[in-house]
Amino acid sequence: MFFIYSFFTSGQVIAQLKDWNEVDGCLVDGVPTLKCLEVVFSNLLFLSSAFFLLALFIMLVSGGFTYLTSFGNPEKVKKAQGTIKFAIIGFVIFLASYLILTLIDFLFLGGQGKIFQFKIGE
């Protein structure tokens, strides 16, 4: 959503969501180190989550449209129900993975949200 919002509101292109300078020790004399993989992984995870949710939304809309335009054809109704079913299953798996990571953060890291910050060695 941030990408879509920034795309329509500003004339500039944002290459990454998290900046290299946000991680201490990432740049040494202007050269990226292995610590910069935190930034790359964080950006990839955020963008892949956004694309996954977009794909699920498109599946739901497509399944709903197929269901509405099936005119009682049993094959089309079955296909639409399958599309909607798998979109909902995908969303439940996505939500469960987020909740599992949040639970791990709460139980083992004290609920500080560090699991989503990708801190190495801290």
Image (spheres, rainbow, N blue to C red):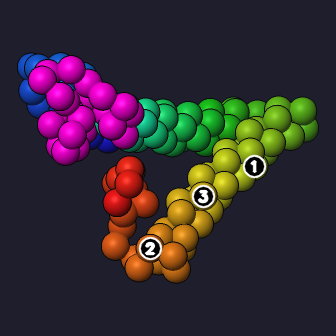
The residue at 67%/38% (across/down) is 63
Element type where label 2 sits in the image: loop
Residue count near mark 2 (Cα–Cα under 10 Å), binned few <14, some 14–19, many ≥20: few
The count of marks equals 3
Residue 49's spot in the image, x, y percent? 48, 41
Which element type, helix, strand or loop, lies under badge 3?
Answer: helix
Q: CA distance from mark 2 to mark 1?
A: 35 Å
Q: Position of residue 46 (x, y in %)?
A: 40, 41
Q: As drawn, which residue projects farthest toward the right?
A: 74
Residue highlighted by disc 3 = 97
Give neighbour class at mark 1: few <14, some 14-19, many 20+ (Cα, 10 Å): some
Q: Which residue is mark 1?
A: 85
Residue in front for this viewpoint, 50 or 38: 38
Mark 1 vs mark 3, CA separation in Å: 18 Å
Front-most of residues 53 and 77: 53
Q: Specify whether residue 111 is in view.
A: yes
- Residue located farthest toward the left when viewing the structure as drawn: 11
Q: 12 or 55, which lies in front?
A: 12
> At label 2, which amino acid type do we have?
Leu
| Numbered circle sitting on residue 109 | 2
Give the position of the C terminus as an image quadrant.
bottom left
Indicate whether 61 appears above or below 106.
above
The quadrant of the rendering that contains the N terminus is: top left
How would you rate the neighbour count of disc 3 (Cα within 10 Å): few for under 14, some for 14-19, many for 20 or more?
Answer: few
Q: Kindly indicate whether the residue at mark 1 contacts the one at mark 2 (C-beta within 8 angstroms).
A: no
Q: Nearer the viewer, mark 1 or mark 3?
A: 3
Based on the picture, tell me whether residue 24 belongs to the magenta stretch.
yes
CB atoms at circles 1 and 3 under 8 Å apart? no
Q: Which residues are magenta?
A: 16-38
Q: Is residue 32 left or right of residue 69?
A: left
